[in-house]
């Protein structure tokens, strides 16, 4: 299977993964044939991408770092919590801990942790999907640093609630599709402080979580907010969440900009290591994140085209590629498999937007 943009798929394609709403309702079941009407239905629900199974992606397995059911449940619970008006005065810290514990258990069951975040999200669910993804990515970095037990749980709670202060900001500002005025932007920046205050008084939540909320927009060179803190004055956990926050935000389609590809965002984050982001955090992050996720279309230096079949942990930029088209643009009747970590004459030069 592979992930494709709805606008790029012809009717008749076979759906490889069930598409569900955040409330757990099935929109379209796996195995169904896509029709124009189904496409409209998906779009009406804010879905812009789906997984399909076609000839070139047959038997391609997209690994999940956390099971989809657990991700959906976490998103659903976070949505319920954030939409409850009582959130402005108190948060159920124990409930959040339970969600995080499930995610941690699932990540740790994986022998080979590589974030290949494959969830299909509706553009309307951005806030909740973002919270859960940032939590998963931060936990992976935490595990990479050797965190375990309470420290890992606290990192999980803090990262899933990193933007909780936004519940104190008016929807009008948060959802504004046009550029914010400087006064409005100053208000948005305060979500860090609001979150810190809210988490500080929450039972069952430790100071680490409050510091994550306060410090996740601070940057090492002092160019962040709200206090322009520098270097070690920013809590280490907040420096972890800064990276996962930016990664997830930039790899997601928003109303005001198109998403970037994972490798582009990794390059961007790497270029800012030690200026904006903690070098150690970036080093760990790139070890655990798929540079070219399974299913990505790629063009090789030979002109051949294919899709990424498997990630090579040791050589993130050199995955195993299933070549499906020759340099002349002719589809191969028999696909060829090239492991770029062994065959050094090959390299990926471009993304193949299929
Ligand atoms: Fe934030």
Image (cartoon, rainbow, N blue to C red):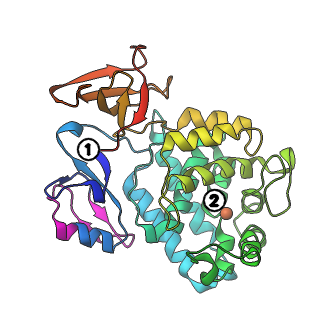
Which contiguous range is marked in magenta?
18-38
Location of mark 1 (residue) = 1
Residue 66 location, x and y as percent?
44, 49
Q: Residue furthest front?
A: 328
Q: Classify mark 2 as within 8 Å of ligand 1 or not, answering yes or no.
A: no
Residue 330 location, x and y as percent?
18, 30
Going 74% across and 41% down the picture, which residue do you hit?
A: 278
| Horizontal relation, residue 133 to residue 349: left or right | right
Residues marked 2 and 1 touching at CB (< 8 Å): no
Going 32% across and 32% down the picture, which residue do you hit?
A: 309
Q: Could you tell me what secondary structure mostly forms the magenta stretch?
A: loop
Q: Residues within 10 Å of mark 2 (few under 14, many from 20)?
A: many
Q: Quadrant of residue 203?
A: bottom right
Going 52% across and 69% down the picture, which residue do you hit?
A: 78
The mark found on residue 14 in the picture is none
User: Does dot 1 land on a helix, a strand or a loop?
Assistant: loop
User: Does dot 2 land on a helix, a strand or a loop?
Assistant: helix
Residue 65 location, x and y as percent?
44, 44
Task: Locate the N terminus and report the quarter of the image it occupies.
Answer: top left
Going 65% across and 37% down the picture, which residue do you hit?
A: 270
Q: Residues within 10 Å of mark 1 (few under 14, many from 20)?
A: many
Q: CA distance from mark 2 to mark 1?
A: 33 Å
Above-or-below relation of 328 to 123: above
Which of the pair 1/97 is nearer the observer? 1
Question: Taking the image as drawn, is residue 30 in sight?
Answer: yes
Location of mark 2 (residue) = 157
Image quadrant, ligand 1:
bottom right
Above-or-below relation of 325 to 30: above
Which of the pair 310/89 is nearer the observer? 310
Closer mark to the observer between disc 2 and disc 1? 1
Above-or-below relation of 54 to 49: above
């Amino acid at each position: 299977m592979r992930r494709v943009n709805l606008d790029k798929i012809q009717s008749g394609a076979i759906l490889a993964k069930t598409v569900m709403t955040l409330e757990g309702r099935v929109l379209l079941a796996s195995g169904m044939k896509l029709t124009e009407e189904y496409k409209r239905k998906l779009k009406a629900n804010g879905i812009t991408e789906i997984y399909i199974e076609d000839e070139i992606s047959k038997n391609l397995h997209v690994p999940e770092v956390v099971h989809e059911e657990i991700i959906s449940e976490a998103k659903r619970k976070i949505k319920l919590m954030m939409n409850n008006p009582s959130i402005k005065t108190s948060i159920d810290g124990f409930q959040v801990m339970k969600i995080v514990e499930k995610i941690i258990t699932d990540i740790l069951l994986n022998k080979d942790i590589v974030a290949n975040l494959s969830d299909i999200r509706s553009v309307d669910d951005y806030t909740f999907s973002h919270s859960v993804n940032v939590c998963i990515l931060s936990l992976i970095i935490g595990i990479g640093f050797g965190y375990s037990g309470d420290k890992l749980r606290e990192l999980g709670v803090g990262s899933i609630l990193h933007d909780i202060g936004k519940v104190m900001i008016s929807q009008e500002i948060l959802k504004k599709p046009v550029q914010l005025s400087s006064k409005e932007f100053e208000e948005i920046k305060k979500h860090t402080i609001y979150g810190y205050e809210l988490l500080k008084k929450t039972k069952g939540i430790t100071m680490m979580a409050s510091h994550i909320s306060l410090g996740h927009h601070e940057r090492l060179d002092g160019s962040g907010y709200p206090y322009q803190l520098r270097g070690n004055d920013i809590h280490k956990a907040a420096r972890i969440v800064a990276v996962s926050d930016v990664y997830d935000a930039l790899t997601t389609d928003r109303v005001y900009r198109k998403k970037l590809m994972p490798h582009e965002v990794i390059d961007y984050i790497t270029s800012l290591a030690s200026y904006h982001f903690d070098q150690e955090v970036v080093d760990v992050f790139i070890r655990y994140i798929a540079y070219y996720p399974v299913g990505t279309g790629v063009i090789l230096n030979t002109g051949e085209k294919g899709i990424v079949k498997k990630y090579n942990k040791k050589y993130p930029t050199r995955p195993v590629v299933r070549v499906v088209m020759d340099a002349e643009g002719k589809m191969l009747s028999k696909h060829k498999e090239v492991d770029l970590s062994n065959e050094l004459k090959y390299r990926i030069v471009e993304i193949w937007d299929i």
